[in-house]
Image: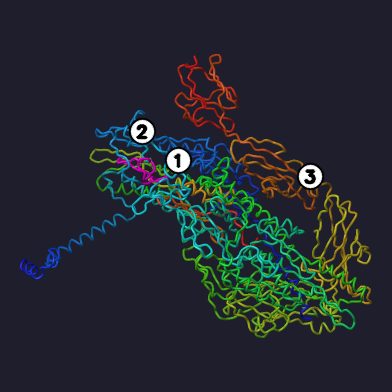
Amino acid sequence: MILVVATFAFAYFISSAVESVSAASPNEVCCERTNDEWCVDTSQNNCDKNYRVAPTSCNQTSFCKSGCCYNSDNGLCSGNSQEAACVSGGGQWTKNDIYCGISQCRESCCVYSDQATWTTQKHCEDIGATGGIESEWRQDILNELQCILLTETQEQGACVFEQDFESNCKFTTKAECIRLTGSASSFYKNKLCSSTELNTICEKQTRTGCIAGRDEVFWFDSCGNRENIYSSDKTASWNNGNVLSKNQSCGADSKNGNANSKTCGNCDYIKGSICGQSGGDYICKDLSCKNVVIGGKTVTKQHGESWCSFDGAIGVGEVTGNNKIARDVVGSRHWRHICINGEERIEPCEDYRNQVCTEQKEETTERTYSACRLNEWQECIDMNTREMDAEECEKKTDCWVKEISVDDFKFKMCVPKYPEGFDIQDANSQEDAQGICSMGTQTCTVIYIKKSIFSSCKPSVNKNCLKPGFTQQMNSLCTSLGDCGGYVNIAGEYSDGGYLVKDGGKKRKDLPQSDIQKYISFANPLLFLGQRVDPGNLTLIPTYLGALGANIQSPDSGLGFINQLAQYGGYAAVAFLANTAAYAIYYLIKSIAFGLSNPIGWLIFAVLAFFYILFGEKVCKKVQVTYNCMPWQPPYGGDNCKLCNEGMPCTKYRCQSLGAACEFINEGTDNELCIASENDGTSPRINPLLGKISEGYQYVNSNPQGFDYGFEIKPIETAEDNCIPAFTPIEFGIKTMKSNGEPKASQCKIDLQHTETFEEMADYFGGNNLFLYNHTTVMSLPSPESLADYFEVPTANILEKYGNLNMYVRCKDTHGNENTAEYSIKMCVKEGPDTTPPYIISTLPENNGYLAFGKTSKNIKLWVNEPAECKYSTSDKSFEQMENPMSCAIHLEDYDLRGGWPCEFNVSDISQDKTLFIRCKDKPWLINDTEEEKRFAMQQSYEYTLKISKSELKIDSISPEERKEIFVGVEPATIELEVLTSGGAEEGKAVCEWEEIDKGWGDLFLETDSATHKTSLPLLKGDYNFKIICEDKAGNKAEASTKFKIKVDTSAPKVTRVYNSGGSLKVVTNEDAVCAYSFDSCKFGFDDPDVELMSGSEKEHTESWQTEQTYYIKCKDYYENSPSRCSIIVRPYDLV
Amino acid sequence: MSKIINKNKSANSHLDFNSINIFAKSKRAQVTIFIILALILVVSIALIYVLIRKPTISISPEDNPQAYIEKCMKDYTTEALEILMPQGSYVEPRNYKLYQNEKIGYLCYTREFYETCKNQEPMLMEHIEKEVTNYLEPRMQNCFANLRRELEKKNYDINIQGMNLSVEIKPEKVFITINRKLQLIKNEQTKNYEIFKAQILSPIYELSIIALKIMNGESLGCGYDYVNEMMLYSNYDIKKFVTGDSTKIYTLKDKISQEEFKFAIRSCVVPPGL
């Protein structure tokens, strides 16, 4: 009987233990600037008084909107910047344009000196101006790779000059030569200084060497001028004193950039070599990484290659037979390795497996490339918050369907392939961990049948739930949800503190040793070579690989920082998806965590009833076997803490996984260590948690030796009966301390029976297996009458045994020191009949919920605080008068993990908002009994309203609209996707998501949950096909799509005609443009002071005719496209 | 002594002259050697002191006040950059991540989970210029005060007016300009100075551009393909380390000067759990 009491009392506790959600502080404001940060929601005291403050969240303010910050001094652009941060530094800020789609931020190839870089026009000019060199911004170069490969960017040659009566020479550009000598005639294009034609003092090929900024080994002449790329074939390299291009030089086709060649210095950094010294000689140094150890084998990795490594098995694999599990062990992390400049580097992916390492092989070169990408585990958990679609789950990159099948106890759950890790010492993470793990808490109802009056009561339905196979399957589910259940850490140490199986109230730990051994093997990475993580939408093969002959298509336009978005586009989308989904899940989990009721039991019950009628079999007993899935707990003690300090970098998560007593110290210093905390060798001291008890109750010192030995819980107002009413939730708690009173983190257990050890005890205090200082629980005791009904014995017998309840508590610290003596907590349930009427705890759909448009019926479920019979009516009347009964769970054992006894009913013919009046009456086992008068019904009805949707949910408009062609001048274009909705349950209020059908992108709108939905997207030129899906609170859905095209105009306007029109110079362009001219040269900007604008902003442009002048004319279109030189040079005297 | 030498010569006829000579040193010779060694030691110590000590001005203010001030400008600018470059562009970072005992300032930051970071210094170059300027100003005032003291000792009359200091970060260089009228009068001779200019070589401009690219990538797309960047631009080395709390520490290095610029980023952080 005690077990039954414990089952209900503690189970009720568990559900309420995770309900508390901390509310955000109402005193927060939006500070445009705090001491050290822009746009923060915080207390007003933290705001910088020189900046703006608003009494709302920063998302709602105009001054914290993000935009583009353009630095007009150097032409650099910063996306996603706040206005004040930009303007206070002297920048120009463009609202909402977070991707910097303004023409000033357009990037193209900047060629200067003998180098090239991908940047904005203004920045290119800045580079030239500062270095006193010529720079040219070339829009004809389509992408960054092409730009970088322009190694020989400007024409160079020999600049000959007299010095000390000798003919000296410098190898340089023409402009530099003119600057040095004052004459262009001194410059000999494409000639080396050692050319015999020039007859200079410089002798050819006197030494070899490297040049900063260039990859190759060069010959140098006796004057110190660089010559052609080094080749041991001196004649070929000298090329008769003429410049020899890189492509014409030795070994141009070499796949490894002539690495280690002694005969050719045509090195190539992208191919894996660079000029360097080796034994006194300059050669192409090999940048590959030798001696890379992968899976115990030594291999060579090429410069730029990257790959993944893991701490053990990853992803989904088998434990035994068909029992699959997500295998990543607790404390493990994914690692990315990179070979760069001959050095192997390790980049840890984000801890707690929030990122996974994914790898791809480029088939032509057989090189591998990797990335740490977001682990989309939340999506899998989210799938279970509604009716789980197994097909949809399998489509998700990081999800899989875990199937549980034990006799008729069958269900499927969508779980992550790479389960999330938890910070079990952080309060927020603890709460999340409990919520996620508890999704794996499930109850299998075993039904015992007595076939005839002569046979015994035997388990019949779901009898295998009584065997270890049930635990095996459930533990696989549990550990696949996150760091939950019984599992191993990175050191291969198994711990079973994360699960409990209760078999009709009795505890059992029956995970077979074979499973445990298999788990331990998962921590050995050498046993699991060649593991791969699906890259999802990511393309990991770098575009520069095209330079190595790999079959890579370069993008049409390289986009500087925006280029990264193309590469990481999926990643970014996923991050936002995680953002929105995570918040939704956070709250949903709380509602479903314990509400995954098992319909199988009901079904079986119905089937059994049928058989009973036919064959006279009788259900003699029902036993609930519950697998409690809790956060994984590290092994006690700290013997293995030191393992964290060896090998890969230690982190708090890795450290915590190695032992409950492991502490990560000196964080942020160069001496981060994982050490074991001091073991005081004493068991935790337990005391009541004063101040934490339900209102109207108190802790009473029941032991003459004080609170150190136990306490009683009693109502403050002592009446005749000093006990607690039945089915009344009471919250109370204990704290654990060291002997000197300092807090001590401990696990605590509670039991209604005497036990010898902590291990033997049945339940964790508050259902919480974490090491805490303060432990709380909520307990609700069943009435003696309900127990009497359950056991089919007189109430007096129940009171005799159960009138005074004594609970026993033990705690255990992180080192495994546990109480030998039990701590006693006493309380008693009120004697006499239960005269308190029942009450409704919750409903589904919630009160004032909505019905989808067109639906006229709805199944409604509610939960009552005690077993009860419930009815409803359309008008308020007494329980007896109510016409409509519900289907209620009326027995004590029908307790639902959601927190109460469920009732269900269906309402039909709903044509308008409907209000129902609900009342319940307790002690349903007394229906039609002579003791009917002992039952108590609710005196007031629970008023439940279901609202109808007045119309369908509609998508009224989508912008950009269908078939629209959008012309832009810069890629990516910042396109605002805007959707308007109407109708449905709440006048168009809905949550919408978008999906780019052809590209597989998708996300929620950034602004949604209203009738207007907006999101900004950085899009490259091309065709787009967007599908929009909206859903409102009632479940009304609307879908629509739009196809549009983005065209990019990157070509400068062309002059099609020039003539004298009535004494004026007339220039005609092929598109609308603005033209400007200078009389000096083509090198001018439209904003330069001595530059004149021609009249006309369309296709015709005029200016006064000055015969003696030369017009250097440059035209730019609406998108700021203009030629780097002139559009046309007009010499009127030629036209006269 | 010669006798002894001779004697030794005969006694050690198989030895070469030098070894005999050394073996035969008198006490006086030994003392001389010790003196020479001591002198070398003193000079070495003095040299080491001069070479490694903190920016002190060895140029005589009297001989060349301009050079004296300009050396100050160079030394303190170098010092400022040495401080701010490992600290995310801040001389005294307030929002930072402690990493290997260094306070690495956040250049892109959000305290929230699931959110992309906000660019903390979109005008990064101007911010660095401001940091260097703020660092230089009091120190340059000090330099001018030292100059005044030194010159006044030499009986100069000094007129100094207000100081206007500007720092400009440009490709490969940092330019420092001080506009300040300085008049030195002695023996009816007047020297006027108005502008002091200095420049130092520094890769801060180039490294800032890479930092801006990374900040943009992180604030818009939650990440940046820094390996691709390194492959395209061989002059720079980029390292990324992700700490246990998902802060990213980027270390940019100019391979030629070996100078490093470190900064921290907190973007798109997913908490353990939900």
Residue in the image at 32% along x and 52% along y: B56
- Of labels 2 and 1, earlier in sequence is 2
Front disc: 2 or 1: 1
Q: How busy is the neighbourhood of tag 2: few (under 14 within 10 Å), some, or many (20 plus)?
A: many
Q: Position of residue A475 (x, y in %)?
A: 69, 70
- Taking depth in this image into account, of A449 and A29 the one nearest to the observer is A449
Element class at badge 2: helix
The answer to the question of whether label 3 and label 1 lie on touching residues, with beta carbons closer than 8 A, is no
Which mark is drawn over residue A177? Answer: 2
Please provide the residue range marked out in magenta: A209-236
Which residue has dot 3 on it?
A: A954
Q: Amino acid at mark 3?
A: Lys
Give the mark toward the camera: 3 or 1: 1
Q: Is residue A41 left or right of residue A249?
A: right
Above or below residue B235? Residue A501 is: below
Q: Which residue type carries mark 1?
A: Asn
| Label pair 2/1, CB-CB below 8 angstroms | no
Q: Work out whether mark 3 precedes mark 2 in sequence or the reverse, and give the earlier one.
A: 2
Residue at image mark 1: A247
N-term-proximal mark, 3 vs 1: 1
Can residue B207 be seen in this snapshot?
A: no
Out of A270 and A205, give the one closest to the viewer. Answer: A205
Q: Nearer the viewer, mark 3 or mark 2?
A: 2
Asked if the residue at tag 2 contacts the one at tag 3, i.e. Cβ–Cβ closer than 8 Å, the answer is no
